[in-house]
Image (cartoon, grey):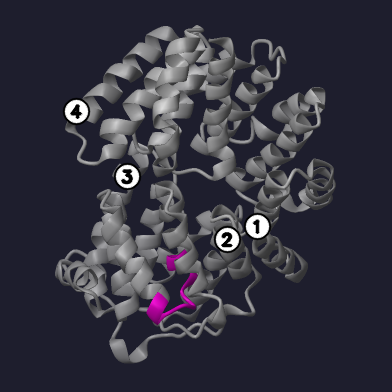
Amino acid sequence: MTDAVSEAVANAPLARPDCPAAPAPGSLAASGQTGLVHGTTSIAAVEAIDHFQGELLRYGAEAGAVLKIREMDPGFALAHALAAAIELFTMTPAGFVAAAGPLAVARSLARLAPEREQMLVEAIHHWSQNRIETALSLHLAIAERWPRDLVSARIGQYHLLNRGEFARMRHLTGQLLSANSDVPAVLGMHAFALEQTGALRDAELLARRAVDAGFDPWAEHTLAHVLERTGRSHEGIAFLSGRSAQWARCSSFLRTHNWWHLALFHIELGDYAEALALYDTRVWGVRKAYCHDQVNAVSLLARLELCGVDVGDRWQELAGWLEGRTGEHVNGFLDLHYLYGLARGGRWRAVAEMQRSLSANAARARDDVWRDIVPVAVDGLVAHARGAASEAAARLGTVLPRLHHLGGSSTQRHLFTLLHRDALARA
């Protein structure tokens, strides 16, 4: 193990007497699907972990069922850690608070778990403490030694997406290929990394292989990226429309996001009425309290307005769902969308409150994303929403080359380029 991995595992606490007893090492169960040994004697728990892995790879609607695995074996450390991960995926302060309890139990039990699970428990713990680089060192080490652990790999890819580290993502997903030639979702994972690093031809070939091999909405999403970046909007509409019937099996994140991609193709072709109809019926309203549904909604309304579309009172309705987000600051990419949505909805008191909160957060931040990039982008977005075109152009132009550090895909971040171009034209 690397020094970072060794330190992370060594710092795990000893088992506490108030926690369930961990299983005896000699009686651990192995997965018939992955061949991985798990820290439980319960075959049902291992099968449930396998099911969770499949749902996580597909962003399936049944991923939350992982919460019940703790009932199958209360001494299964990984089950408690994955219950915490579900909370962390919400990307809210409340989710981070809710993750603390199951993580404390998981770390107490992990001493007698297999080494791989010790490392994964610690990675999720470091995620909960916002020590993402340490978490990533663990996920990358797991991918190298146990490439069939796709739960760890998917979480690692999620972190790399949120940090805009796509070359590193490509390295991570590339390590998985030879050991997972039978898993379409791994092809989809690597195809996305290829697309984000500019290898569009290879990304398309791999994404199509994944789509042809089985239901993989993430590979469909990747192919949408390729078709958008190569200007094939008609093909994109035909492809996504033909796949959309199965998206109800996904969580709201990928379900609404794939519809969002379909709406972008209609915008590109000037079919604004259809894009607005997709906003009303498919993109907004599945889980209005969920961060990624809100981001999709903000982005789509902004793009429609930039094309001269009158979106009516939709900004005002959306802003009502954003007002409670002003002090969260879990992710800079999310914060920029929240702020712009509040500004376009005319919630200026909430905008001022969020600016003050972001300023205080920047003052105590240790990394340059929160300290240097976010505050300038915030000023640019507020200026754009107020109609101060020259200020918006100057501020956004300063940070555009560095915005990838906030996370989000290239297509998602393109919104900020569009706003900058609009400000330049108006100025």
Q: Position of residue 111 (x, y in %)?
A: 22, 76
Query: Judging from the image, what secondary structure is the residue with disc 3 in?
Result: helix
Side of 199 where 80 appears, left or right: left
Q: Position of residue 408 (x, y in %)?
A: 49, 43
| Depth order, front residue of 87/389 | 389
Among the 4 quarters of the image, the one containing residue 295: top right
Q: Mark 3 or mark 2: which is in front?
A: 2
Give the quadrant of the N terminus: bottom left
Whether pointer 2 and pointer 1 mark residues with C-beta atoms closer than 8 Å, the reply is yes
Q: Which residue is mark 1?
A: 200
Q: Mark 1 or mark 4: which is in front?
A: 1
Q: Which residues are magenta?
A: 144-153
Q: Mark 3 or mark 4: which is in front?
A: 4
Q: Earlier in the sequence, mark 2 or mark 1?
A: 2
> Above or below — where is 52 with respect to 424?
below
> Above or below — where is 324 with respect to 426?
below
Q: Which residue is mark 3?
A: 96
Q: Mark 4 or mark 2: which is in front?
A: 2
Query: In percent of the image, x 60 and y 22: which residue is there?
Result: 302
Give the residue type that dot 4 points to: Ala
Give the residue type that dot 3 points to: Phe
Query: In percent of the image, x 39 and y 13: which residue is there?
Result: 350
> Above or below — where is 108 with respect to 260?
below
Q: Which residue is mark 2?
A: 194
Q: Residues within 10 Å of mark 4 (few under 14, many from 20)?
A: few
Query: In percent of the image, x 38 and y 18: which residue is there?
Result: 379
What's the magenta bit mostly, secondary-structure-wise?
Answer: helix
Q: Position of residue 393 (x, y in %)?
A: 47, 18
Give the residue type that dot 1 points to: Leu
Residue 427 in the magenta stretch? The answer is no
